[in-house]
Amino acid sequence: MNTTVVSLLSMGTMGGLFALGLAVASKKFAVESDPRVDEIEEVLPGANCGACGFAGCRAFAEGVASGKALVDGCPVGGASVAKLVAEIMGVESEGPQRKIAQVLCKGGLAEAKKRGEYTGPRDCRIAEATQGGDKACTFGCLGYGTCVAACPFDAMAMDENDLPVVFEDKCTGCGLCVAACPRDIIVLVNEEQGVHIRCRSQLMGRFIRPVCSVGCIACQRCVRVCPTGAIYMENNLAHIDYSKCTNCRKCVEVCPMNTIEWQEGKPLITKGAAS
């Protein structure tokens, strides 16, 4: 028999055996997909932002189906999506309380003194790692808009004072702006919370006054007037325990630096809001 023919027959036989082996192996070791994964992915927002801690909506859906993620683990979808996911999984969920990003700094161009001119890229992380920006306060907002660039929902913008502004109606509480800020100025709080101490400086009062006109001077008036013990001092800075704050606004009234701010339209909280 011709050598070429023999070779072709041998190769064909071997190919057939390999194909048969692969077919048997694929059936034997096949992993059945959970149909709930597709259903969960269908009701998710599709932002693929990673705010849930997973690499996209599909991965989150797989995590929920396998028990590795909570049904209310999608901050972008909020309570409505959590309810749908819970229904698919056959469990109950009231969903998480909506979170909103808050910028805890009021020291913009008009309030914060400059120590020089920053000549590097207008990126907060690069500025912090190199020259430290151009503001004299080393705790305040750098003002280069890295948080705004990180927001995939157009829920933030820089104002004319070089401070980021959050549009609450668009904010999903995904936390990407929080992660983007190198100075930890942005936090997520419950939507109903209306009182905020907009300062992160740990400088003593006599040092903060020359560099920022709205910085906390650690006078402790807010601490003394708070009826629920929600405000405390730490490292020369007043902090709010949001789980105790009731939006009574007494601290706002006594702050001599206008550091503590009240957002109009927020309700009086009769029960503490979890932070």
Image (cartoon, grey):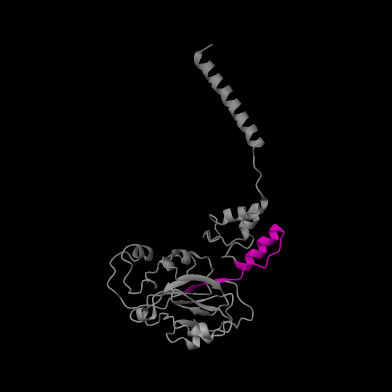
Residue that appears at 48% across and 88% down: 254
237 displayed left or right of 39:
left
Magenta stretch contains residue 98: yes
- In depth, the one of 47 and 209 nearer the eye is 209
Q: Quadrant of the C terminus?
A: bottom right
Image quarter hosting the N terminus:
top right
Q: Is residue 249 located in the magenta-colored stretch of the structure?
A: no
> Looking at the image, which is closer to me, 33 or 120?
120
Residue that sits furthest to the bottom in the current view: 253
Q: How many marks?
A: 0
Give residue 143's quadrant in the image: bottom left
Left/right placement of residue 185 relative to residue 248 reads: left
- Say whether residue 69 is left or right of residue 141: right
Pick the residue in front: 89 or 223.
223
Q: Residue at x 69, y 58 (%)?
A: 88
x%, y% of residue 115? 29, 74
Q: Is residue 232 above or below residue 28?
A: below
Q: Is residue 144 above or below residue 266?
A: above
**Residue 226, image quadrant:** bottom right
Q: Position of residue 253 (x, y in %)?
A: 50, 88
Image quadrant of residue 64? Answer: bottom right
Rendering coords of residue 67 (x, y %): 65, 54
The percent position of residue 273, horizontal first and vertical second, equals 60, 75
Q: Is 146 located above or below residue 269 in the figure?
A: above
Near-viewer residue (66 or 209): 209
What span is colored magenta in the figure?
78-103
